[in-house]
Image: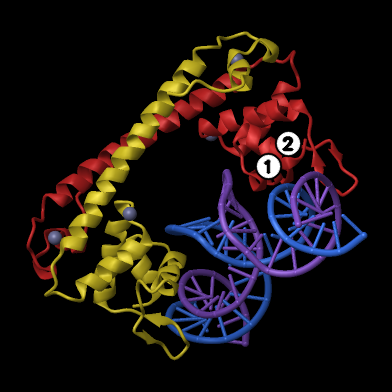
Chain colours: A red, B yellow, C purple, D blue
Amino acid sequence: MKIGELAKLTGCSVQTIRYYEKEKLLASKRRSEGNFRLYDQSAVGQLMFIKNCRSLDLALSEVRQLIELNQSPGMHCDDVNKMIDNHIEQVEQRMKELEGLRRHLTSLRDSCSTNRTVEECGILRNLSAKQLENP
Amino acid sequence: MKIGELAKLTGCSVQTIRYYEKEKLLASKRRSEGNFRLYDQSAVGQLMFIKNCRSLDLALSEVRQLIELNQSPGMHCDDVNKMIDNHIEQVEQRMKELEGLRRHLTSLRDSCSTNRTVEECGILRNLSAKQLENP
DNA sequence: CTTGACTCTATAGTTACTATAGAGTTTAAA
DNA sequence: TTTAAACTCTATAGTAACTATAGAGTCAAG
Ligand SMILES: [Zn+2]
Ligand SMILES: [Zn+2]
Ligand SMILES: [Zn+2]
Ligand SMILES: [Zn+2]
């Protein structure tokens, strides 16, 4: 199949597939006479693997590691487990940050009401303050 | 004062200050004979304003809008309020996404235990599956 | 007068794509 | 058979908000 069909089958864009190739994540094994990339069924699986990883916010460099690991079936998979553990931690960390941000933004929002002028705006006044209180 | 002192006073890096100038967020009013940027006390306040905005994850384009607004003290501040409301929504949206991600990652993690080989790795097997279940 | 700390501009790199431009290829209809 | 549409190719630039150089110039102290 050509790149367009692979794109349709996987829900990736054509440019994204070419980008993954450049990044050594997915190779097309053959080219047509007119130099078009040709893929077989296994490419669908490989691309879905990448897509699944991306949906979990794994970086492409990590996806690359996983692909390489996948090629040594006898090795221990500790590194995979660690990578996921790491991600869970990072996600939780980011959630905490966002929670702090949300509280900050909410209290900032409460410092202004409707029908005020820029001069009177509590938000702008707070943003101008020497330093916002730390969460 | 020169750029290095401004950087120290505000906790921004020198390059960041120059970047903000290029992005029309903070101008140095004068230059020294040797072409060094010179700042007065008001620059400290302006830069802290930017820093406060950034700590709330406001985009530089939004900071620019706020700075412009700040220059029309008689106008209504509705746009400011709307901007903050918007941000609160976006933050809450992102928190929801991360919560879904966390659940996904956690259940994926549970599909593997210690002392398995790559071949047996539940995580890799799940990532290879045609499609991950949607949250 | 030299050393070191500072500053200047310009440029490239980061991440994971997306969006062109300009050219060539393939397929299908007219 | 011609021609048009649809597809593909490479190469390049853009995104956001910085960070990190390189190479040159400025300034203060010793
Ligand atoms: Zn990671
Ligand atoms: Zn207001
Ligand atoms: Zn925003
Ligand atoms: Zn495993």
- The residue lying toward the viewer, choosing from A11 and C17, is A11
Contact between labelled residues 2 and 1, with CB atoms less than 8 Å apart? yes
Q: Which residue is mark 1?
A: A17
Q: Is residue B122 positioned above or below A133 on the image?
A: above
| Label 1 vs 2, first from the N-terminus | 1
Could you tell me which secondary element the residue under label 1 belongs to?
helix
State the quadrant of the C terminus of chain A: top left
The reply to whether residue B9 is in sight is: no
Q: Is residue A110 positioned above or below A49 on the image?
A: below
- Residue type, label 2: Leu
Could you tell me which secondary element the residue under label 2 belongs to?
loop
Q: Dot 2 falls on which chain?
A: A
Lateral position of residue D27 relative to residue B129, left or right: left
- The residue lying toward the viewer, choosing from B67 and A20, is A20
Q: Residue at x 36, y 39 (%)?
A: B94
The reply to whether residue B49 is in sight is: yes
State the quadrant of the N terminus of chain A: top right
Within 10 Å of disc 2 (Cα), the crowding (few <14, some 14-19, many 20+) is some
Lateral position of residue A23 relative to residue D27, left or right: right
The spot of residue A92 in percent (x, y) is 38, 30
Single out the residue that lies furthest toward the bottom.
Answer: B33
The spot of residue A116 in percent (x, y) is 8, 64
Q: Residue at x 27, y 37 (%)?
A: A99
Q: Which mark is residue A113?
A: none
The spot of residue A85 in percent (x, y) is 49, 23
Ligand 4 occupies quarter? top right
Q: Which mark is residue A26?
A: 2
